[in-house]
Amino acid sequence: MRYVLFDVDGTLIDAVDNQRLVWHTWAERYGLDPDEVYRVALRTRPVETFAQVAPDQDPRECLAALHELEDEDVRDGSYAAFDGASELLNALESGTWALVTSNYEHRVRGRFARTGLPVPKVVVDAAAVTEGKPSPVPYLQAAAQLGAKPEDCLVIEDAPSGVQSGLRAGMTVWSVNTPAAVNGVHRHFGSLRDAVQDILAYSSEVHPDRLEG
């Protein structure tokens, strides 16, 4: 069998504007430059962001404030699933796909409920691992929970840290929803919609030669 492991924000859910607004609001609470904070946050986990942009603040209080804003966004924010996401996820066989996110499962479930996307049996979130992307741990954990070998897994990502996570896990990695291919990927698609049929073909065990491009 072959398996598909999806990142969430930026890959299945269009939440870029939401993430920017959340971080800008958080930065303003602490009297920081919102643009600089967001630039750092794009490259690091929240605790690492706090250490860099607000080293004099209690990281636990910083995280609590961020979580409050993110939970508000799940309830009241305006966002949508990317075109093709619903068709793709509903076409995949149960038990052959998972979500691997740097967010938290309750927020993923909230956003999926609001956008009508199905939630798989396996969701590996920030609370489930001690090392986040770009470590291979999140994707390796998802594969283990599915009973899959890394070489039988396809990772769908939009961010460099996620791509590196999948590659370090020894998996095939495709990027979507970016103007240019993320460095290191095996294939790139300008949008998730463009990748739908190829992802479904992969999950149906097409010949390996078809995976190159």
Image (spheres, rainbow, N blue to C red):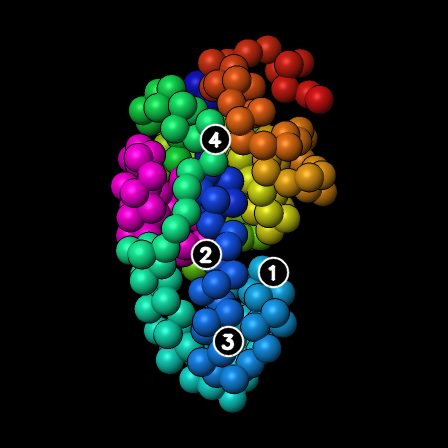
Identify the residue at horizontal 56%, vertical 19% (top origin).
Answer: 198
Q: Secondary structure at mark 4?
A: loop
In this figure, which residue is indicated by the disc labeled 3?
Answer: 27
Nearer the observer: mark 4 or 1; the answer is 4
Disc 2 marks a residue whose amino acid type is Asn
Q: Secondary structure at mark 1?
A: loop
Disc 3 marks a residue whose amino acid type is Ala
The boundaries of the magenta stretch are 99-128
How far, Cα to Cα, is label 1 from label 2? 17 Å
Pointer 3 local density, CA inside 10 Å: few below 14, some 14–19, many at least 20 = many
| Quadrant in which the N terminus appears | top left
> Which quarter of the picture shows residue 35?
bottom right
Q: Earlier in the sequence, mark 3 or mark 1?
A: 3
Identify the residue at horizontal 32%, vertical 61% (top origin).
Answer: 71
Q: Earlier in the sequence, mark 4 or mark 1?
A: 1
In this figure, which residue is indicated by the disc labeled 2?
Answer: 18
In this figure, which residue is indicated by the disc labeled 1?
Answer: 43
Pointer 2 local density, CA inside 10 Å: few below 14, some 14–19, many at least 20 = some
Q: Earlier in the sequence, mark 1 or mark 2?
A: 2
| Quadrant in which the C terminus appears | top right
Pointer 4 local density, CA inside 10 Å: few below 14, some 14–19, many at least 20 = some
In this figure, which residue is indicated by the disc labeled 4?
Answer: 83
